[in-house]
Image (cartoon, grey):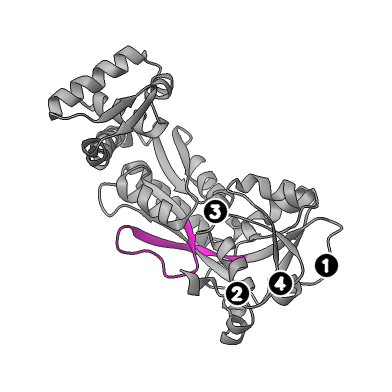
Amino acid sequence: MDIRQLEYFLAIVDHGGFNRAANALYVSQPALSQAVRALERDLGGTLFHRIGRRAVLTEAGTALIEPARAAVRGLETARASVAAVHELRDGKLDIAAMPSQAVEPLTTMVRAFSGPYPGVSVSVRAAFTSRDVVDMVRTGAAELGLLATSGPLPDKEVVSHAAGEQRFVLVTPPDGPFPADRPIACEELSGQRLIVGQRGTGMRAYVDGLRERGIDITIAAETEHRVAILPLVLAGVGLAVVTESWRTMAERAGALVLDIEPRTTLRIALVSRRTGLSPAARTFMTYALEAMENPDHTEHTEGPDHTEHTESPEHTENCANPQARR
């Protein structure tokens, strides 16, 4: 068994088949298949059921995923440790991020890190829920993760570092139903059509909480593709409740962004494995968290020190309470 065989195995898992994995790895499919057969001989078991063009994991294959990722990550850490001697002149860092947080604060974090370390490539992996982020970091699919939650920050499977808060805001077309010169009360959303994300996300939990409290909201569209929300709003399909990380992008596109009262927020965290971080990951965390502590580096995102807008118990009664849904 060698590390190349494990990398080929994981590529088949991640890309969903031999053909796609071979294309991604720039190797021939026969060479890929031969490497996997050699790995299966070494392990004494079949890793995939080959059904036509499909490759379906066997029980043994499923059991191999996590240790294979750990082995590959260990080699990458060793390589990166050598590169660290040369001041991180090259290398790669995988970060799992939820869609809204991939807009901000990830942009600010990557900018802070990439300035002094332009040779390190940052690869952002998509994760739709905080659970997805934790699982990707825990299993080694990503070394760091950026998530948002209305509840306590995760602390059992990963290490969490607080990275501020983001409030919920309403995005409307420029000719939408509300004036631009004031916040809106959450009760004013009654009778409106909203575009929402899938269940398990903070913004969807907020909208579901409004409906559970008797605020009459119609779901105009539900999308897993977060990039579709703003075009749908501008096309007049409906309004959208999103986090304030969208504010700058939405306003530049011509949308109107309104604060919602009472203020309701998500907590942002940068999460990592407990041990074995690469030099790139450790350095990224240092620069990223320093950027979050400096308000000059954070656009439209207020951290936990901004306590004057903290949600009161009366607000929780009057509006959605996403934390209760977590």
Mark nearest the camera among 1 and 2 is 2
* Residue at the spot of label 1: 178
Mark nearest the camera among 3 and 1 is 1
Q: Secondary structure at mark 4?
A: loop
Q: In terms of sequence position, does the residue under pointer 2 or pointer 3 come before the other?
A: 3
* Pointer 2 local density, CA inside 10 Å: few below 14, some 14–19, many at least 20: few
Percent position of residue 177, x then y:
84, 65
Under mark 2, the amino acid is Glu
Under mark 4, the amino acid is Asp
Q: In terms of sequence position, does the residue under pointer 4 or pointer 3 come before the other?
A: 3
The dot on residue 216 is 4
Q: Residue at x 12, y 28 (%)?
A: 44
* Pointer 1 local density, CA inside 10 Å: few below 14, some 14–19, many at least 20: some
Under mark 1, the amino acid is Phe
Q: In terms of sequence position, does the residue under pointer 1 or pointer 4 come before the other?
A: 1
Percent position of residue 53, x then y:
39, 22
Q: Secondary structure at mark 3?
A: helix
* Residue at the spot of label 3: 101
The dot on residue 212 is 2
The magenta stretch is: 147-167
Under mark 3, the amino acid is Gln
Using the numbered discs, state the Cα–Cα distance from disc 2 to disc 3 in whole angstroms. Answer: 26 Å
Using the numbered discs, state the Cα–Cα distance from disc 1 to disc 4 in whole angstroms. Answer: 17 Å
Q: Secondary structure at mark 1?
A: loop
Using the numbered discs, state the Cα–Cα distance from disc 1 to disc 2 in whole angstroms. Answer: 23 Å
Mark 3 touching mark 1, by CB under 8 A?
A: no
> Foreground residue, 249 or 20?
20
* Pointer 3 local density, CA inside 10 Å: few below 14, some 14–19, many at least 20: many
User: Dividing the picture into quarters, in which one does residue 159 lie?
Assistant: bottom left
> Foreground residue, 193 or 242?
193
